[in-house]
Image (cartoon, grey):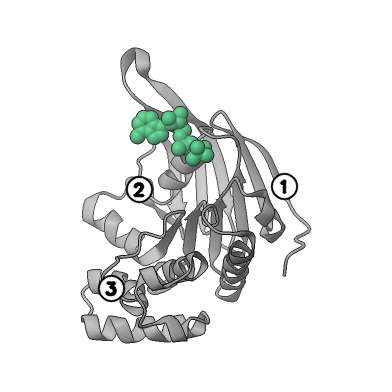
């Protein structure tokens, strides 16, 4: 089976001269379809930098990064943007929904960006929200939704173009325990259903039972990589 993510020797630094700091030291990292992989480790150890490089948002100085067998470290400009737009969905701690758009319109935003008519994008947004158990909320503004519901709309937005890789940076950090569990249950289901891979950067140990694999970083290196006997459904 082809890996979804295959990174070799990824090195990344920030700054110049004396202030130059190396944040990733030759990381090797592979993710297979159908898995939820957690990346954990202390603040500043390089988790967000790593997933940004894996998603093609940041360029590594050294190393190779392939997504779905394609070398994204060799892609430039518009080609990379289009490839990322098709292949990767992002979910962040802040839901970043557009306040003036209702839930279905928010979910449909990536389709509009890709050139779809807003009415068609909204219709597809409604259909996906229904699938995610949020059909009744489709016409509501973000301010009328709970945190957990807003995060599920953000998940719908990340999935509407059916990316094979979902990258989630602290997806449950602003949610209470129950909403956090509901969001993780949804991510769990989505990872397994379409042979997609989900990578979750997190400090939230309440959700560790949802991981298939936990990768631990320290000072820009992977120091532990273990499969879990997943205890959550
Ligand atoms: N654009 C940047 N310019 C300079 N330094 C940066 C930049 N982005 C990140 N860093 C530095 O790189 C290091 C790793 O940051 P990163 O955000 O990847 O850590 P993290 O493990 O995700 O931390 P946290 O858990 O706090 O989010 C930190 O020391 C940070 O200050």
Closer to the camera in the image, 70 or 229:
229
Question: In the image, residue 90 lies at what x, y percent?
Answer: 42, 59
Q: Distance between the residues labelled 3 and 2?
A: 26 Å
Q: How far apart are marks 2 and 1 (CA)?
A: 27 Å
Which quarter of the figure has residue 195? bottom right
On screen, residue 12 above or below 166: above
SS of the residue at dot 3? Answer: loop
Question: In the image, residue 45 lies at what x, y percent?
Answer: 54, 33
Question: Looking at the rendering, in which quadrant would you find the C terminus?
Answer: bottom right
- Relative to 127, 211 lies left or right: right
The residue beneath circle 3 is 101
| Label 3 Cα crowd, 10 Å radius (few <14 / some 14-19 / many 20+) | some
SS of the residue at dot 2? Answer: loop
The residue beneath circle 1 is 226
Q: Say whether residue 162 is visible.
A: no
The residue beneath circle 2 is 57
- Relative to 122, 186 lies left or right: right
On screen, residue 141 above or below 26: below
Q: Which residue occupies 54% across, 55% down?
A: 199
On screen, residue 141 above or below 45: below
Instruction: Mark 3 or mark 2: name the one nearer the start of the chain.
Output: 2
Instruction: Mark 3 or mark 1: name the one nearer the start of the chain.
Output: 3
Q: Which residue occupies 36% across, 74% down?
A: 107
């Amino acid at each position: 089976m082809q890996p979804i993510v295959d990174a070799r020797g990824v090195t990344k630094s920030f700054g110049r001269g004396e202030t130059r700091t190396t944040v990733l030291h030759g990381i090797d990292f592979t993710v297979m379809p159908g898995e939820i992989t957690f990346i954990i480790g202390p603040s500043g150890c390089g988790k967000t930098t790593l997933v940004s490089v894996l998603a093609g948002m940041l360029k590594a100085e050294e190393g190779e990064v392939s997504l779905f067998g394609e070398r994204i470290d060799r892609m430039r400009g518009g080609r990379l943007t289009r490839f990322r737009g098709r292949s990767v969905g992002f979910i962040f701690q802040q839901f970043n929904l557009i306040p003036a758009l209702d839930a279905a319109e928010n979910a449909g935003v990536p389709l509009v960006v890709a050139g779809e008519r807003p009415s068609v994008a909204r219709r597809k947004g409604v259909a996906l929200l229904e699938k995610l158990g949020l059909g009744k909320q489709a016409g509501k503004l973000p301010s009328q939704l709970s945190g957990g519901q807003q995060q599920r709309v953000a998940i719908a937005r990340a999935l509407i173009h059916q990316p094979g890789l979902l990258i989630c940076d602290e997806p449950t950090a602003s949610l209470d325990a129950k909403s956090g569990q509901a969001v993780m249950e949804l991510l769990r289901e989505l990872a397994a259903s379409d042979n997609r891979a989900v990578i979750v950067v997190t400090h939230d140990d309440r959700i560790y039972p949802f991981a298939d694999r936990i990768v631990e970083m320290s000072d820009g290196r992977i120091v532990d990589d273990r499969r879990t006997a997943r205890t959550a459904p």
